[in-house]
Amino acid sequence: MSTYVLGISAFFHDSAAALLRDGEIVAAAQEERFTRKKQDPDFPARAVEYCLEAAGIGPEELDVVAFYEKPFVKFERLLDTFSGNAPSGFPMFREALPEWAERKLDLPRVIRTALGDGFRGRIVFAEHHESHAASAFFPSPYEEAAILTLDAVGEWSTSAIGHGRGSRLELTQEQRFPHSLGMLYSAFTYYTGFKVNSGEYKLMGLAPYGRPLYRDKILENVAEVGDDGALELDMSYFSYLEGVAMTSERFHDLFGGPPRPPESAIGQKEMDLASSIQAVCEEVVLQAADHVHGLTGSKRLVMAGGVALNCVANGRLLREGPFEEIWVQPAAGDAGGALGAALLAWHHMMGEPREVSPRDAQGGSLLGPAYDNESIGLFLDAIGARHHRMDDESELVDRVAEILDSDKVVGWFQGRMEYGPRALGARSIIGDPRSPEMQRTMNLKIKYRESFRPFAPCVLREHVSEVFCTEPDQDWPYMLFVADVQKHLHRTLTDEERVRMEDPDLRIRVSVPRSELPAITHVDYSARVQTVDRERHGRFHRLMERFHERTGCPVVVNTSFNIRGEPIVCSPDDAFRCFMATDMDCLVLENHVLLKEEQPVGLTVDADAYRSQFTLD
Ligand SMILES: [Fe+2]
């Protein structure tokens, strides 16, 4: 008889479920992928259903359900914040109260109702940062490692440090709300006109266009950083305690005006602010890492929490910091808390040992649902889509490599869906990085966004250091580190391009090719690298090998299979609709190849109607 532990994160943002069978990760997925609501915070009923199905069990076989945080402690923080800021915090409190009364403070009932009468197991609660820490340490390839978690806030903790060895981990120090690196970064996200909890990565992408002119102003006025990376915020610059907005009038006075209205033009000020807060963030991360290194003496570090998705900071930490190796949980945000809570229950509460996997236990984070060729074929026939089934894989990858080589954009849908915010080659839109037009085409005709961010590269792992400044054979399967494009690939700018690089309009600047691989090279020659290897990535690796043989280029452009504001596609149905609503040229659903030009007119999806379903992120 196997033992099953189900982890759940829910009711903040990005709900998810993860399932362990005898300690091994069987399945994990975010609720948004099923409900098609980006960062769906609701109870992850569909994700739970999927996890049970993947294991072939019913709720009656679950031994333990682990929730990723302690709702009563979190409520205590809410009460405390409210009473400390009364009466200004009252509207926020009044708005939040019914949800707490009905669901969040009655989670055992909510969970038992959702799982049905059959469920007889125990329900346990982990602490938010313990869940993050467990999600970082237990699946990592290390027997022993220092731990650093950083996010906006859990119950009270906003960051924590500790140490893991074998099947145990311990958090020894924490930083408490309202002093929070995640909140500070989000405050600048808000102030520069991006959406909090999703626009942070845009701010990170904007940073290389600016200069850190406001760094000193931030550190002298707003945030004091201790030698140990502890942060003390002057709360008079913020208004998140009152729940009205992130930043206060005092903040606006300090930085010279009100926040940028969302979707309005981005100016040099926003770029300089982005550069400044990114610099502060990197300094805090480096300080905190130094501190935990000093305490533990460990050569390895594991990280999780939303701030650990800052791959620019991660790259710098690896280059400049004291650790030889770093592993970051790919679902570093709260979705990953589901996995962490389950692993914590397994090792700590149930006392089970841990076997360290040399490559890590995350399985490429390909932990979501897969669809077989028969069901895909039936679906395509039922809707009347034209498709070519190619069961000979060599022919299939040949054909797709040829399509990519002719500057076409391909929707690539293979195997199990990714767990975490990044598409890693299972639900990806891919293209040729050498093409000077690729970035623009993908942004405007496929993602429907005007972007200053280049796309991320996937590179054959065996060639990574030829293209990027990394160790040979660097293993980065989760797109969590930034590295520079090798110098010999940089382009020398023409005089005309130099002038364009000074243009206040970012769209002009972004169109200047920086390297031989313009679609993936940022303005500062950096790139957010994912390595693709034979063992984890199967067919995707074979496709990239074929593309390399054909073109001499071991890289493809990879962006998530979705449009702006849409969760990454989960099913063939989602993928087909997104394919038809955009200018994607080709869709590959397992062995089925679909060409846009062959699709019947009746299947066309109106792009505007499709886009209007999703809220801009
Ligand atoms: Fe968190």
Image (tube, rainbow, N blue to C red):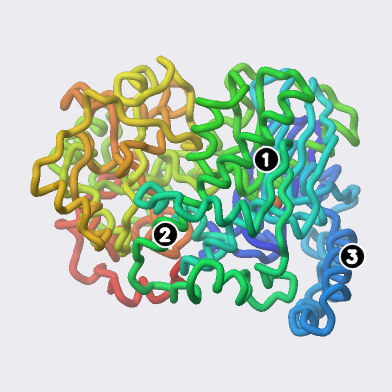
The kind of residue tagged 1 is Ala
Residue 102 position within the rendered picture, expressed as x and y whole percent measured from the top left: 83, 75
Q: In this view of the protein, which residue sits in the foreground, 588 or 357?
A: 357
At 73% from the left edge and 53% from the top edge, which residue is drawn?
A: 232
- State the residue position of label 3: 76
Q: Is residue 357 left or right of residue 414?
A: right
Q: Which mark is residue 55?
A: 1
Q: Is residue 574 left or right of residue 244?
A: left
The residue lying toward the viewer, choosing from 191 and 146, is 191
Q: Is residue 447 left or right of residue 128?
A: left
Identify the mark nearer the N-term, 2 or 1. 1
Give whichever of discs 3 and 2 has the lower sequence position: 3
Crowd rating for badge 3 (residues with CA inside 10 Å; few <14, some 14–19, many 20+):
few
Q: Are marks 2 and 1 in contact (CB under 8 Å)?
A: no
Is the residue indicated by label 2 positioned so its CB lies within 8 Å of ligand 1? no
Q: Looking at the image, which residue is at 66% across and 68% down?
A: 238
Q: Nearer the viewer, residue 60 or 403?
A: 403
Q: Which residue is mark 2?
A: 574
Q: Nearer the viewer, mark 3 or mark 2?
A: 3
